[in-house]
Image (cartoon, coloured by chain):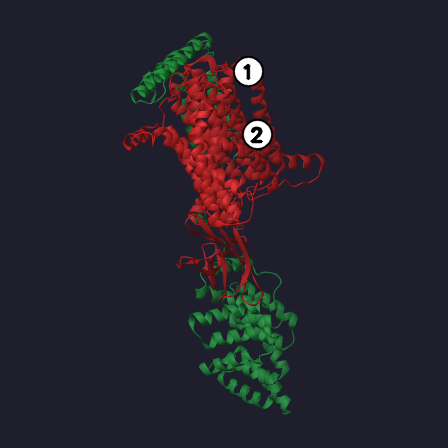
């Protein structure tokens, strides 16, 4: 019965959302009572969807195969964790997770939003309820997770073995929180457009939501990338796969939004652009959902392709995005533009940042959609792969990275570019030195690598230099400097840390791409192979049995250049229920670098094994940088004091600081 | 029961919405309820002014900068008070109660369309699994997957090995018996079973490892009939009739005379003697036929032990009555659906191509 109650709870939540949306949009001016209704409605939606989600989890944990979803995607032998993650390891369940996070966000606005103007609150919650209605109805009517079987089987079909990993517990919830979090920014933008009011209080609300979503999206993408890296077994961490791009586009737009929301909160400028970016960012999140869920693309993310679902999502997408942009076109001129500023100023730098990020987003968008459109319209299949993206995206990101360290140095409203260049000159010198040093140590052919490294060091060191500059190190005594350093607002630390993290990621990307060593070989027990100074010896092949799989594990000992030995166990697994084979790579981390081993096919008869080995120098910096960026976002999020960006006074006689 | 819960949930949700709409939100602080939009805005600007003062005190902002910031805030506040129109409008009295009613109706209508209120939850732990013999393939698959995880489970191998034999999967049977011998140590029975599997894999030829296994089994247990039977049979097959006659004769001494294998052994002895050129010492063929028919009539009417069924099938085969043997075999499988108890019968049937096409029910 609990499954049916969960089903009913989800339906009731949808009904509340639908009524909330209608009442909210018609009577948003009516003040307290409507706002109270919507707030209570938002909390109820969350409680009810949560209850529905809990019954699904309960049914999966109890292996209740009268639930069609559990019969198709679970197995009684799965460990408890995978029974739980199986709930969203499929199309229907992942949509429930999507809706679940959507209503969680709505409930958070309802709970924290009591001090918001009532009309704004009513409009935000009405928009949020409209989204909930749309996506919950889509879930219920085209992909109902609560479909039952009257004659249930005694065993389930098992979760796709590739997904039987801790990654499924981490990556989708993080990514969805990021995706769906931007719905709040979207709802605030719609509310601003309808009410025609947009002020600093609005920005004060949008910025934390942007930060929050951005932090989770960053972590979600980074964890997804690392999961793909260790699970799919081809040793790559980013493939410019359309599904990856689908998550990357909202990230780029969200990063732009983050920066423009900053300008808006502190300086009350860039309002219309911020509204526009809020709509764009969530639209790209929806586009991502469409690309992944419609079955247009085939990847590990596509669970089942069903043309009806694709069409319905496309229609939803058209209504939500089209409606939002139509609203924007009609109402944008009614919004009052904000404060003025000179071209060379913090605001100006952030606009440049926004333009470059937006261009990069468009480049990725074109590269992702063009093949799909061409295929749909002419039937011609072309493949836009890594070379296109490396070139266009790289060409756009390079200038962004070049100007990045200047930004935090510039004063608000008007700034002195020459003095900033002078203050950053030594950073450029240091970055060049670090690059030459790094390059000399690693060696290698002439390539773009030194340029990439230079950019990475430039960004990372520039971020640190900003802290140094604000603390006045070397310009005053050490004690004063340290006092100033720790007296800096947390946002300054967050900015520096985030930019430093970006630099770290760039260094990791360049290094792992330029100096990666790869070796594919056949090894018999007792044989050794050498890669990048590491001697890998194949000791033996072991048969292991897991809870729902059996595996052949190659036991390899790795002798590192420093003389220490480690044992690595790459595996080939067969999942018993589905008979699906998977490979489990063995990854050994040495400092920031990794040795990646994959066990390929067995050779007929002679006990030989195909072994793939990669040495990836500084590869972990890629994800470490992403974690630093997310951490910086969290730090900034904890800082809720109102900061007013002080403009540089117009009188030239006053010193810049 | 479901509907009671569903109505209760809906009632609670609707009540919560109704009270919220009446302005009696639970946990609502009076201050939050009183805050009007203008107050909120003013409070926001005052907060900003306090932050600027704080920044000056902490030395983060120079006096000149502070003046510029304050000037901007003042301009902002003035601009705002010019443009902001107070939110006006009133929802009609029926709107919110109507919305609540619509919510409940929408929920029940949708659920009536999509739900299965009568269907109970069926957690696996509360369900009785089907008897394993219903679908042999399914049962085999389950035992096999269980053995993947617990390859040391001797009981599992004991159950599955004869089924492999019956299905003609001699290589799998061989693997299973070898595993069993490794797990429980060799015994005359197991060695004979393994030998049987190997012999069948060789198309009935027991030379080589099978024969060695049978001899080992016979040495292990001097009273062991089946191994001696195969040894004698192999001697006969190989044309070693003198030895065969001795072995058959020795074997027949182990029996009391009414065992199922005795008639076969007698036939073997006769064949060996015929090979030697001696006279056949067979009982009268017609008398045997009568005995077999009598046994069949009794078993079909009153049932009997699995040993009796096995003897019946074996006798039919010796007499060349293959069609009868097949129907006897099917009947026996119906009487004894558990493959574990009819090992010998299954092996016999498999040896003679009697693998049943339809699964026993």
What x and y, as percent, mark residue B320? 65, 76
Pointer 1 residue? A331
Q: Nearer the viewer, residue A488 or B134?
A: A488
Residue at the left extreme, as displayed: A479
Whole-percent x and y of residue A589? 43, 51
SS at mark 2 in the image: helix
Q: Nearer the viewer, mark 2 or mark 1?
A: 2
Taking depth in this image into account, of B56 and A431 the one nearest to the observer is A431
Of the image marks 2 and 1, the number of the one nearer the N terminus: 1
> What numbered label is drawn on residue A359?
2
Which residue corresponds to the image point at 43% horizontal and 18% vertical from the top-left?
A: A200
Residue A168 location in percent, x, y? 47, 43
Q: Is residue B40 left or right of residue A580?
A: left
Seen from the viewer's position, the closer of residues A111 and A231 is A231
Give the colour chain A carries in the figure.
Answer: red
Label 1 resides on the chain identified as A
Total count of labels: 2
């Amino acid at each position: 019965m609990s499954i049916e109650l969960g089903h009913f709870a989800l339906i009731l939540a949808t009904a509340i959302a639908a009524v909330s949306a209608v009442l909210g949009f018609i009577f948003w001016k009516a003040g307290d009572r409507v706002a109270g209704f919507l707030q209570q409605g938002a909390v109820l939606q969350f409680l009810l969807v949560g209850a529905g989600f809990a019954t699904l989890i309960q049914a999966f944990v109890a292996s209740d195969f009268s639930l069609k979803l559990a019969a198709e995607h679970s197995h009684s032998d799965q460990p408890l964790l995978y029974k739980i993650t199986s709930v969203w390891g499929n199309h229907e369940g992942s949509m429930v997770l999507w809706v679940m996070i959507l209503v969680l966000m709505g409930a958070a606005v309802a709970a924290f939003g009591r001090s918001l103007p009532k009309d704004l609150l009513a409009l935000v919650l009405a928009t949020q309820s409209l989204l909930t209605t749309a996506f919950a109805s889509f879930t219920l009517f085209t992909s109902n997770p609560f479909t039952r079987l009257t004659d249930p089987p005694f065993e389930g079909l098992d979760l796709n073995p590739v997904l039987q990993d801790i990654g499924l517990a981490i990556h989708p919830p993080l990514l969805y929180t990021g995706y769906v979090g931007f719905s709040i920014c979207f709802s605030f933008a719609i509310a601003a457009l309808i009410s025609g009011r947009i002020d600093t209080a609005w920005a004060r609300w949008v910025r934390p939501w942007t930060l929050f979503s951005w932090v989770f999206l960053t972590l979600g993408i980074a964890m997804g990338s690392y999961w793909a890296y260790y699970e799919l077994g081809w040793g790559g961490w980013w493939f410019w796969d359309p599904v990856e791009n689908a998550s990357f586009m909202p990230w780029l737009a969200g990063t732009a939004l983050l920066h423009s929301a900053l300008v808006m909160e502190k300086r009350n400028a860039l309002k219309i652009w911020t509204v526009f970016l809020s709509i764009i960012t969530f639209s790209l999140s929806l586009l991502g959902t469409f690309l992944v869920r419609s079955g247009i693309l085939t990847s590990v993310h596509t669970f089942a392709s069903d043309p009806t679902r694709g069409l319905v999502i496309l229609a939803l997408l058209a209504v939500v995005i089209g409606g939002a942009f139509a609203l924007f076109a009609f109402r944008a001129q009614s919004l009052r533009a904000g404060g003025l500023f000179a071209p060379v100023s913090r605001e100006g730098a952030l606009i440049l940042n926004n333009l470059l990020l937006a261009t990069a987003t468009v480049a990725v968008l074109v590269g992702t959609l063009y093949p799909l459109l061409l295929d749909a319209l002419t039937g011609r299949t072309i493949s836009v792969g890594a070379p296109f993206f490396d070139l266009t995206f790289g060409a756009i990101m390079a200038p962004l990275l070049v100007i990045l360290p200047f930004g935090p140095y510039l004063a608000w409203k008007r700034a002195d570019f020459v003095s900033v260049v002078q203050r950053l000159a030594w950073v450029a010198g240091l970055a060049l030195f670090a690059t030459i040093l790094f390059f000399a140590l690693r060696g290698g052919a002439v390539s773009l690598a030194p340029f990439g490294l230079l950019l990475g060091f430039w960004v990372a060191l520039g971020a640190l230099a900003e802290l140094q500059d604000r603390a006045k190190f070397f310009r005053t005594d050490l004690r004063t400097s340290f006092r100033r350093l720790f007296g800096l607002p947390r946002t300054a630390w967050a900015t520096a840390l985030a930019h430093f993290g970006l630099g770290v990621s760039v260094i990791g990307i360049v290094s792992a791409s330029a100096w990666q060593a790869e070796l594919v070989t056949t090894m018999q027990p007792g044989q050794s192979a050498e890669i990048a100074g590491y001697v890998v010896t194949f000791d033996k092949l072991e048969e292991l049995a897991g809870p729902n799989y059996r595996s052949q594990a190659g036991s390899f000992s790795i002798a590192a250049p420093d003389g220490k030995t480690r044992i690595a166990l790459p595996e080939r697994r067969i999942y018993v229920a589905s008979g699906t084979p998977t490979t489990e790579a063995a990854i050994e981390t040495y400092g920031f670098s990794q040795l990646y081993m994959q066990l390929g096919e067995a050779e007929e008869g002679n006990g030989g094994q195909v072994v793939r080995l990669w040495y990836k120098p500084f590869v972990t910096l890629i994800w470490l940088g992403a974690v630093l960026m997310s951490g910086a976002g969290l730090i900034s999020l904890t800082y809720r004091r109102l900061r007013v960006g002080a403009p540089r006074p117009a009188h030239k006689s006053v010193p810049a600081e | 029961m479901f509907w009671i819960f569903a109505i209760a949930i809906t009632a609670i949700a609707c009540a919560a919405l109704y009270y919220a709409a009446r302005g009696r939100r639970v946990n609502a602080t009076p201050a939050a309820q009183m805050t009007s939009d203008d107050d909120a805005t003013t409070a926001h600007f005052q907060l900003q002014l306090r932050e600027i003062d704080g920044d000056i005190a902490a030395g983060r902002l120079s006096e000149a900068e502070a003046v510029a910031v304050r000037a901007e805030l003042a301009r902002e506040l003035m601009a705002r008070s010019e443009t902001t129109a107070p939110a006006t409008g009133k929802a009609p009295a029926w709107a919110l109660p109507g919305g609540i009613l619509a919510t409940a109706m929408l929920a029940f209508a949708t659920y009536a369309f999509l739900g299965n209120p009568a269907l109970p939850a069926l957690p696996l732990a509360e369900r009785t699994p089907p008897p394993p013999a219903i679908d042999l393939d399914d049962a085999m698959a389950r035992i096999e997957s269980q053995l993947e995880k617990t390859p040391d489970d001797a009981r599992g191998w004991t159950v599955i090995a004869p089924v492999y034999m019956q299905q003609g999967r001699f290589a799998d049977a061989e693997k299973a018996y070898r595993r069993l011998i490794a797990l429980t140590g060799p015994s005359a029975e197991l060695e004979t079973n393994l030998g049987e599997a190997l012999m069948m894999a060789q198309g009935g030829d027991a030379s080589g490892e099978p024969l060695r296994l049978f001899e080992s089994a016979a040495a292990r247990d001097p009273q062991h009939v089946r191994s001696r039977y195969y040894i004698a049979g192999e001697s006969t097959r190989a044309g070693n009739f003198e030895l065969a006659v001795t072995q058959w004769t020795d074997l027949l001494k182990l029996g009391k005379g009414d065992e199922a294998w005795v008639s076969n052994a007698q036939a073997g002895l006769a064949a060996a003697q015929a090979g030697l050129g001696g006279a056949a010492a067979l009982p009268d063929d017609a008398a045997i036929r009568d005995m077999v028919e009598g046994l069949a009539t009794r078993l079909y009417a009153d049932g009997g032990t699995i040993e009796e069924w096995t003897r019946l099938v074996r006798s039919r085969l010796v007499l060349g009555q293959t069609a009868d043997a097949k129907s006897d075999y099917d009947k026996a499988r119906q009487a004894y659906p558990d493959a574990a108890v009819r090992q010998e019968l299954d092996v016999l049937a498999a040896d003679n191509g009697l693998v049943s096409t339809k699964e026993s029910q």
